[in-house]
Image (cartoon, rainbow, N blue to C red):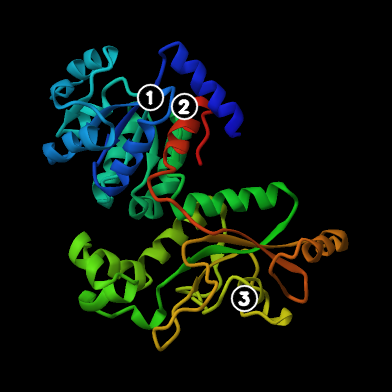
Amino acid sequence: MSAVMRHKLREREARENRIKVGVIGAGFFGCQAIGQVSRIPGITISVIADIHKEKATRGFIRFAGRKPREIVEANNAETVNRCIEKNTPVITVDSQVLIESDVDVILESTGVSEVAAKNAYEAINNKKNVVMATVEAECVVGPLLSKMAQEKGVVYSQAYGDQPSLICELYDWAVSSGFRVVAAGEGTAARLEWRHKPPDDALQRFGFTREEIERLKPNPKMYNSFIDTTKCATEMVAVCNATGLKPDVRGMHFPLGSRKDVPKLLSLKRDGGILENEGVVDVITRVRPDGRWVRNDIRWGVFVVVTSDSLDARGYFKTSEVPRGARGKNALVYRPHHWVGLEAPISLIRAVLYNEPT
């Protein structure tokens, strides 16, 4: 995939026919993507839309390396298009202006579910490819937007680098390789017992030091959603939308375990695990009841637990020394990290070059 992709991007760069990207929402995710796109040949950030003009400007200056004097503010698509032709960076406070411009693909990264759903709907109606980074919107209306995009001949995609897309990639790899998926999911620092805890000490429970809290000033409400199971549930719904997997029980199990424990826990009960069914999503936590962390956890990672009716394949599970469960029938395949925002360019590129979602 990557070799062909990089060659195609270099060809576009040589022809000065770069993929033109519009970003709606210049927050953390959007700016991470903006910074990475600016380092890739054959693709460029053409327009940034944000209701706060200074944030859109910051996206171009700090993350894309553009000079302040280069940036043009526009309130109509005609002006935007003239700037795009000259490779002039454009900002706007009106997302509809960006949607109606000549960009090739749009990254929706507002983080506001109602706004994101509307932006995606309008973009698809304007026959624009859409990469949805606002997973809260994806988990509710993603299937509808995907169907609508197919009818319009464009791409609607989850954002690569966020957990749902990476889990779906592992799922696709497993099924396309002839394995059966027992379970798929992610690691977390959340606990079921924290579902109703207020955000007062959320930053400390998440793992921030006092120095980091003072320096970074992270939002305790947002980080509370990461560890009270809200975010995990949202992300797993997105995985279910894209794969057809389902939770084994309402709210999922959220078992405690290390990497080696994952395929043992996420196996059927008759095989020594906790599951009633195969083909499920679940989340593995690293946080013990006393607050201490499990060693060799999968906190930042994503995974699939696969099985096969082939004795030869099961034999190779053992030979390759991967973590196994269900008396050797099940094996863990995982990626130890996800880089939020930094990997989103893959989605933008694949949507345009290959007409495929991630």
Q: Which mark is residue 190?
A: none
Name the element at disc 3: loop
Q: Would residue 196 be found to the left or right of residue 130 on screen? A: left
* Few, some or many residues within 10 Å of mark 1 (<14, 14–19, 20+): many
- Going by the numbered disc 1, the residue's amino acid type is Asp
Q: Is residue 33 above or below residue 278?
A: above
Residue 147 rendering spot, x and y as whole percentages: 46, 40
Q: Which residue position holds label 1?
A: 104
Residue at mark 2 to residue at mark 1: CA–CA distance: 7 Å
- Going by the numbered disc 2, the residue's amino acid type is Val
Quadrant housing residue 157: top left
Q: Which residue position holds label 2?
A: 352
Name the element at disc 2: helix
Mark 2 and mark 1 residues within 8 Å of each other at the beta carbon = yes
Circle 2 or circle 3, nearest the eye = 3
- Going by the numbered disc 3, the residue's amino acid type is Asp
Residue sitting at x 32%, y 36%: 34
Q: Would residue 284 be found to the left or right of residue 80 on screen? A: right
Q: Which residue position holds label 3?
A: 261
Q: Would residue 38 be found to the left or right of residue 74 on screen? A: right
Which is nearer the N-term, disc 2 or disc 3? 3
Residue situated in front as seen by the camera: 34 or 144: 34
Q: Is residue 258 above or below residue 219?
A: below
Quadrant housing residue 203: bottom left
